[in-house]
Image (cartoon, rainbow, N blue to C red):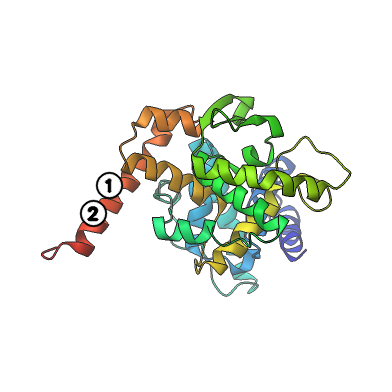
């Protein structure tokens, strides 16, 4: 509620004191609502964000396919908002003070190490139906590189346990078929009886459901991963970081860029190429850490 109130106050300021046109204010409102949605998934409030949080959000928008011009406008919108909060002494800091738009959205995505990924995926309690479901969610996200929106939209029949594939519909309702490893398939199999118990005498077309017989939402997945991240000793983790980690792991183990592009559902291979930079950076980091004369 506080986030909504802050945005409403700022829009009122733009309308009454700055005298901006209604179309301009509507554009600001759309951008700030996008920011607020991301922040709520992180279970944070707008005032608590720092520069690194904003860099992460800009990077996610870029990876999700938004045009440079759209991200530039978004950056301008949030910069004006935080300058207002700072001027009104609502916030003690302006996280956009040293935020350079183009450099920020081209920042390399954050990925989990192999050890962090294992701790995160192993965090759910497998003695409960919810834990079995959550383990299947985490395994499938990492094994397939699905976006959260694609995962929550999966139907029961979209996972082919025999062939080891997942059918999903990404941006623009584009269909793709992605291979899935044995571990993820095994946990999906273990989850299916738990799914029926969660549904009780009800039914659902969706693969992942909650105790109220409803499909899991994107917000629930975000909260789930944050909780398990804390349990695994990881300070900051998002569903998209599992997607980033999926792509980086494939390239580090010899997958070709075109194959990774197809599995991620990127329309442009230039979007996928950022993971080659991540892979190279990790190689350099390993050299500096382990070579005796580095």
Q: Which residue is mark 2?
A: 284
Residue 237 in view in this figure: no
**Residue designated by label 1:** 280
Location of residue 72 in the rendering, given as x and y in whole percent from the top left corner? 51, 44
Q: Nearer the viewer, residue 68 or 130?
A: 130
Say if mark 1 contacts mark 2, CB within 8 Å: yes
Q: Secondary structure at mark 2?
A: helix
Residue that appears at 62% across and 64% down: 227
Compared with residue 108, is residue 89 higher up or lower down, i.e. above or below?
below
Residues at marks 1 and 2, CA–CA distance in whole angstroms: 6 Å
Q: Position of residue 30 (x, y in %)?
A: 68, 45
* Residue at figure coordinates x 63%, y 59% from the top left: 126
Is 97 positioned to the left or the right of 49 in the image? left
Relative placement, left or right, of 235 versus 31 is left
The residue under the point 23% across, 54% down is: 284
Which residue sits at x=30%, y=37%?
A: 254
Residue 253: image location, x then y, percent: 32, 41
């Amino acid at each position: 509620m506080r986030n909504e109130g802050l945005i409403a106050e700022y829009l009122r300021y733009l309308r009454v004191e700055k005298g901006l046109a209604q179309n301009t204010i509507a554009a600001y409102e759309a951008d700030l609502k996008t920011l607020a949605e991301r922040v709520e998934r992180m279970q944070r409030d707008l005032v608590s964000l720092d520069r690194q949080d904003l860099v992460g959000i800009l990077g996610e928008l870029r990876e999700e396919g938004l045009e440079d011009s759209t991200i530039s406008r978004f950056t301008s919108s949030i910069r004006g908002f935080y300058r207002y909060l700072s001027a009104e002494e609502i916030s003690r800091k302006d996280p956009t003070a040293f935020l350079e738009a183009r450099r920020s959205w081209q920042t390399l995505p954050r990925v989990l190490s192999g050890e962090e990924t294992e701790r995160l995926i192993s965090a759910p309690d497998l003695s409960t139906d919810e834990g079995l479901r959550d383990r299947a969610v985490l395994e499938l996200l990492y094994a397939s590189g699905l976006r959260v929106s694609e995962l929550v939209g999966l139907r029961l029949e979209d996972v082919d346990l025999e062939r080891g594939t997942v059918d999903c519909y990404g941006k623009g309702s584009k269909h793709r078929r992605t291979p899935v490893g044995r571990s993820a398939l095994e946990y999906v199999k273990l989850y299916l009886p738990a799914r029926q118990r969660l549904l009780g005498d009800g039914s659902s077309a969706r693969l992942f459901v909650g105790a109220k017989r409803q499909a899991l939402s994107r917000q629930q997945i975000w909260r789930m991963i944050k909780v398990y991240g804390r349990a695994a000793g990881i300070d900051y983790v998002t569903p998209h970081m599992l997607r980033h980690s999926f792509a980086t792991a494939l390239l580090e183990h010899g997958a070709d860029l075109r194959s990774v592009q197809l599995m991620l559902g990127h329309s442009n291979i230039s979007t996928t190429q950022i993971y080659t930079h991540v892979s190279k950076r990790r190689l350099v980091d390993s050299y500096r850490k382990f070579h005796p004369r580095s």
